[in-house]
Image (cartoon, rainbow, N blue to C red):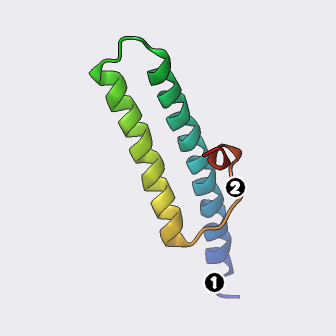
Amino acid sequence: MFGKKKQKLRRAYNELLLQDIDNAKLGWDHARQTKAAVYDVDEELIAEVALAKARYEFLYREAKLRKVKGHIQASVLDY
């Protein structure tokens, strides 16, 4: 009776966190591909790649702290 709503909310927010991690990984991959494709790389592009990486790593650490288990993204297996 007590705590069921809390568990339901935790599950819902964990799913949102996993979706955010997937989106951050895709964003980081896109930023790296853009950096590799551009001939003249400027500081703004380098900062964009660093920001995308930091966002992904932050969300990943948060999931690790929460001990969230999810699916393995196909792009992670490429490395």
Q: Quadrant of residue 50?
A: top left
The image shows residue 55 at horizontal and vertical percentages of: 43, 46
Q: Nearer the viewer, residue 5 or 78?
A: 78
Q: Which residue appears at 61% of the width and 63% of the height?
A: 14
The image shows residue 62 at horizontal and vertical percentages of: 47, 62
The residue labelled by disc 2 is 72
Q: Nearer the viewer, residue 33 or 14?
A: 33
Q: Residue furthest left?
A: 43
| Marker disc for residue 3 | 1
Q: What's under tag 2, amino acid-wise?
A: Ile
Q: Nearer the viewer, residue 34 or 62?
A: 34
Cβ–Cβ under 8 Å for marks 1 and 2: no
Q: Which residue appears at 37% of the width and 38% of the height?
A: 51
Q: Residue furthest front?
A: 79
The image shows residue 25 at horizontal and vertical percentages of: 56, 42
41 displayed left or right of 63: left
Q: The residue tagged with tag 1: helix, strand or loop?
A: loop
Q: The residue tagged with tag 2: helix, strand or loop?
A: loop
1 or 2: mark nearer the eye? 2
Query: Callout 2: few (<14), some (14-19), or many (20+) C-alpha neighbours within 10 Å?
Result: few
**Relative height, residue 25 to residue 33 (above, below):** below
**Relative height, residue 29 to residue 9 (above, below):** above
